[in-house]
Amino acid sequence: MTDHYSESMSESPLIRRARQLMPAFWTIILIVGFASTTINIVLNHPEKVVGWRAPGLIILIICLLTAYRRISWGRIYQDNGISEQQALMLIRLQLLALLFLVRGYDALFAWFSFSVLYQIIGGLSQPRWPLPLIGLLVVFVVSLLPTDGSRTVDIGVIVGATILIAGNIAVALFIQSLGKRHAQLNTMFERLRQAYTALTISTAQAEELAVLRERTRLARAMHDEIGHALVVINVKLEAAQLLYAHDSARGDAELEATRALIRRTMTDLRHTLTNLRAPVVDYDDLPAALQRLAQETQARTTIVITCCIPSMMPMPPIDARQALWYVAREALTNVEKHALANHVTITFDCHNDQWLLRIEDDGAGIHSLDLETPGHYGVLGMRERMYAIGGTLNILAGGVSGTIVEAHVPIKVRMEAHVL
């Protein structure tokens, strides 16, 4: 019964209304059938409705209609729903009443057997079918037995009736299987719809989180670089103002140093704005994006940048590609601004169950104390991005000089997260 309710809940209001009206329609058909059969008995066999037999006929017909209405309507309206055990008892009652009708009044009442058949198929689980179906076959056989005292039974008619019942059962089973398949497809469709909705919400949340992270990174860059530079510029201007009163040459030198600092700050600001305009499509093809990043950096500096990236390798998911691209960009920015390097090597590969991005320069190197300075070299931002995707970031000293930045992303972890 539960499957029927869940299926009906997924239907449109029009179809659901039609299903609700169907039992009433068939009830009217049954009433007409019983009325016509009863009229036939009264006209052609009046002796069968004499005395107590007339009210007996009416009582049997009322029992059949009441049981049918209880089963068929109970399957549609959940408030009037009945258990399978109750449905089985009502079907047994109908078979008993039908047996009295076909044997005591008229064999034409056997047509109601088809209604009982569909109640068995639609109202009971398959393990409960055998006994009611045997009872139904007994009703058919009894309806075919002669009532004039002869013992002649048409075996062909009995076989035909059996085949007819079996054919109806086969058709009903086929329709039932189609209904179950339809319900399964509806359930699957609903799950897909829910999954699509959840994916849409998750994507929107991921985009909002990416925007928030980028704003945080920008705020940190503005505070650490431009904010610091503005403080230094203010101090230098005050120093130059004081020096002009005693030593104009030193004042001019201080102003020149201030102008140089302003130029560097403007360059840093341009780099920051350029990074903000980085297109999202750069993340789709990470090897090509890394090569473009290297070419752009090399074009505005004297640093020679070499990219070592295999032509064929599995690519990480989009969020991992984005994080790795940001690490490479931040590392190259640090080399350009602080390392005084002549050559940089960018390596991106996939081995030992992980993706590895490695940026190595031959510059002045970085002291371990510098890594502990909050916000220095954008290390905090790089670590945050790698942590968000389940990766790690290592900053090491080079073999002779320079610095090595390594970003590791485990393949198994990222693949599982991507599938989920």
Image (cartoon, rainbow, N blue to C red):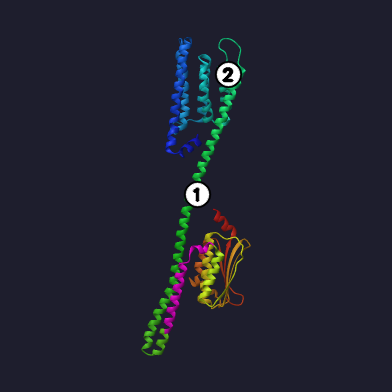
Instruction: Judge from the rendering whether residue 165 lies leftward or rightward of residue 278; answer left or right.
Output: right
Mark closer to the observer (2, 1): 2
Q: What is the span of residues highlighted in magenta in the rendered image?
A: 256-284
Q: Are marks 2 and 1 in contact (CB under 8 Å)?
A: no
Is residue 248 placed above or below 419 in the rendered structure?
A: below
Which disc, if any, is residue 95? none
Is residue 291 placed above or below 253 in the rendered structure?
A: above
Q: Residue furthest right?
A: 352
Q: Is residue 273 magenta?
A: yes
- Residue 285 picture location, percent across and down: 55, 63
What residue is shown with label 1?
195
Is residue 44 placed above or below 396 in the rendered structure?
A: above
Rounded to the nearest angstrom, the CA distance separating label 2 from label 1 is 55 Å
**SS at badge 1:** helix
Task: Say what amino acid the circle numbered 1 marks.
Answer: Ala
Instruction: Judge from the rendering whether residue 186 lies leftward or rightward of residue 314; answer left or right.
Output: left
Q: Is residue 9 magenta?
A: no
Q: Quadrant of residue 287?
A: bottom right
Q: How many marks?
A: 2
Residue 373 appears in view: no
Q: Mark 2: few, some, or many residues within 10 Å (few <14, many ≥20)?
A: some
Q: Quadrant of residue 276?
A: bottom left
Secondary structure character of the magenta stretch overall: helix
Task: Say what amino acid the circle numbered 2 marks.
Answer: Val
What residue is shown with label 2?
141
Residue at point 61%, 19% (across, down)? 156
- Residue 419 picture location, percent across and down: 55, 54
First reached walking from the N terminus: tag 2 or tag 1: 2
For the residue pair 67 and 347, the one nearer the viewer reads as: 347
Residue 211 appears in view: yes
**SS at badge 2:** helix
